[in-house]
Amino acid sequence: MKKIGIIGGSGLYDIEGIEGVKEVEIKTPFGGPSGAYVTGSLEGVEVVFLPRHDKGHKISPSEINYRANIYGMKRLGVSAIFSVSACGSFKEELKPMDFVVPDQFIDRTVKRQSSFFTDGIVAHVGFANPICSQLADILEKSAKAIGSTVHRGGTYLNMEGPQFSTRAESNLYRSWGLDIIGMTNATEAKLAREAEIAYATLAAVTDYDCWHSSHESVTTDMIVECLTRNIDNAKKILKKAIVEAAKIESFSAENALQFALITDKAKISEKTKKDLDIIIGKYI
């Protein structure tokens, strides 16, 4: 069975039925991850959790070491990642307390390291479909099974942050026909694809950004309150999704690098080969 990774807030880890819980520290060539990985098992499925912002939410979205986070998941043998995160909504029908399982991203970030392939090695992975449809199917079915309102499909705008949108930005993104906005998932998805890990997002709508007449601005209190209220639903969804995802024999992301590496193998440094062995070893 596949090993499943979860990236999200620390409150997600207290899922009923998780056994053998322990913390694992991982060192990576890219520095330290957001925090210790929490491992355990659910109905015989090995699960790896990671607090995206560390315990106590101490790391800003732009300061997260995304490469280390995904590298650590790869080192621990994870084949698929469910990402759980808060998001703002650009559409009236995507209401606070709803869930969205997007299928596309627009990345507006400018400060992040979003590739493992730098410093003398180049790879171009296909990213036309950034979300694993198999995992998205499972999230949608799991959310419906527990009675949550879930919207399948749509585009997630990944802003840089940590500030929220201006009203002009919010209305611009709405004019583009986008659905939700967040600060983290596109970067994770890019790195997961390079690491040949399947990836899908379970986005919890917490607000209408700042375009909506019901509130003129977004506040952290608003987001935390809504996310806290929905955390139990997220855990119920994950409990079902983890078990189903582990049954999948193969994911399309598992061969993402097959035709992506472009650098002459003879020109790749020994250090890079060593650092990226768990990602590119089978190809070089």
Image (spheres, rainbow, N blue to C red):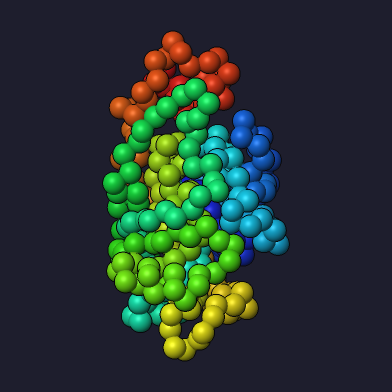
Q: Residue at x 41, y 61 (%)?
A: 157
Give x and y (percent) for residue 4. 47, 47
In depth, the one of 140 and 247 nearer the eye is 140
The image quadrant that residue 200 belongs to is: bottom left
Q: Residue at x 31, y 67 (%)?
A: 176
Does residue 31 show up?
A: yes
Does residue 6 show up?
A: no
Q: Residue furthest front?
A: 168
The image quadrant that residue 79 belongs to is: top left
Q: Residue at x 39, y 29 (%)?
A: 123
Q: Is residue 203 left or right of residue 103?
A: right
In depth, the one of 64 and 40 nearer the eye is 64
Q: Residue at x 58, y 18 (%)?
A: 271
Give x and y (percent) for residue 88. 46, 72
Quadrant of image for the N terminus = top left
Q: Is residue 66 left or right of residue 57?
A: left
Give x and y (percent) for residue 184. 51, 56
User: Total of numbered circles in the picture?
Assistant: 0
Quadrant of image for the C terminus = top left
Judge whether 18 appears above or below 279 on screen. below
The image quadrant that residue 18 belongs to is: bottom right
Judge whether 273 appears above or below 68 on screen. above
Q: Residue furthest bottom?
A: 214
Q: Is residue 256 left or right of residue 84?
A: left
Give x and y (percent) for residue 233. 48, 72
Q: Is residue 24 left or right of residue 198?
A: right
Q: Residue furthest top?
A: 266
